[in-house]
């Protein structure tokens, strides 16, 4: 008679879905810093800050839609 074996597939960690989001955030921030270092000007600084703040706001909006309201 064959032995009964259970095959459990491990569930991904709860924060595993956020890793790509934070990886992209690091890339956007690095690109913004490189832009300011490569072309130090007020326009480059405004573009870099706008990119980082805009991406951060986008992440917050996306996560708030995924998580949903607290009263559910």
Image (spheres, rainbow, N blue to C red):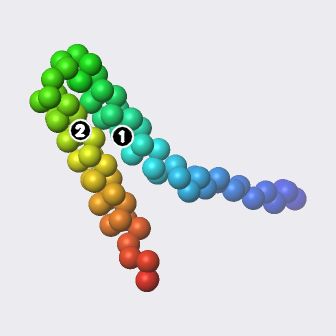
**Residue 40 coordinates in the image, percent (x, y):** 19, 20
Classify residue 8 as left or right of residue 25.
right
Compare residues 11 and 1 and report the one nearer the observer: 11
Q: Which mark is residue 62?
A: none
**Can you see residue 68?**
yes
Image quadrant in which the N terminus is located = bottom right
Image quadrant in which the C terminus is located = bottom left
Q: Name the residue under label 2.
A: 49
Outermost residue on the right side: it is 1
Q: Residue at x 32, y 53 (%)?
A: 59
- Total labels drawn: 2
Q: In which quarter of the image is residue 2?
A: bottom right
Q: Mark 1 points at which residue?
A: 25
Label 1 residue SS: helix
Q: Which of marks 2 and 1 is in front?
A: 2
**Residue 25 coordinates in the image, percent (x, y):** 36, 40
């Amino acid at each position: 008679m064959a032995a009964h074996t259970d095959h459990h597939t491990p569930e991904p960690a709860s924060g595993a879905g956020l890793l790509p989001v934070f990886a992209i955030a690091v890339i956007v921030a690095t690109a913004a810093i490189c832009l300011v270092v490569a072309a130090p000007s007020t326009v480059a600084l405004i573009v870099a800050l706008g990119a980082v703040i805009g991406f951060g706001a986008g992440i917050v909006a996306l996560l708030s839609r995924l998580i949903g309201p607290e009263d559910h």
